[in-house]
Amino acid sequence: MALSMTINTPYGIAVTDAYHRVEGLELLSKVQARFQLRAYADPSMAAIGDTAYTCAYDLGGPNPIAQAYLHLKTLSEFANAVDC
């Protein structure tokens, strides 16, 4: 599970169809999770971006990683992201 979308690096380089993967997910409580979203130009290479997010977590919902992706899709910055 991952997302694909174009990003601009801090160096002003646009990376088309960058691969975004949720990593390092940890449950902070029964209702909150924290995770890193890492962006890759190529999934076999080093990350070109890394951002921390916190989201609501539902014990009765889908697995925590799926919930992290569902949260990302609610954010305007990921409006054009595609599942991959």
Image (spheres, rainbow, N blue to C red):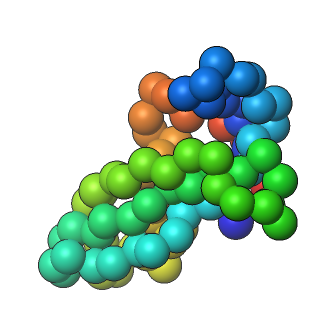
Residue 34 in picture, x, y percent from top left: 31, 65
Q: Quadrant of the N terminus?
A: bottom right
Res 79 visible: no
Q: Quadrant of residue 24?
A: bottom left
Q: Residue at x 36, y 54 (%)?
A: 52
Residue 2 in picture, x, y percent from top left: 69, 58
Residue 72 in picture, x, y percent from top left: 47, 46
Q: Residue at x 81, y 30 (%)?
A: 16
Residue nearer the viewer, 52 or 49: 49
Q: Residue at x 41, y 74 (%)?
A: 25
Against 46, residue 12 (above or below) is above
Residue nearer the viewer, 77 or 30: 77
Q: Is residue 41 left or right of residue 81?
A: right
Against 67, residue 52 (above or below) is above
Q: Is residue 55 left or right of residue 78?
A: left
Q: Residue furthest top?
A: 12
Against 67, residue 9 (above or below) is above
Q: Residue furthest front?
A: 11
Q: Quadrant of the C terminus?
A: bottom right
Count the numbered circles shown. Answer: 0
Q: Residue at x 29, y 69 (%)?
A: 33
Q: Quadrant of residue 56?
A: bottom left
Res 16 visible: yes
Residue 4 in picture, x, y percent from top left: 74, 44
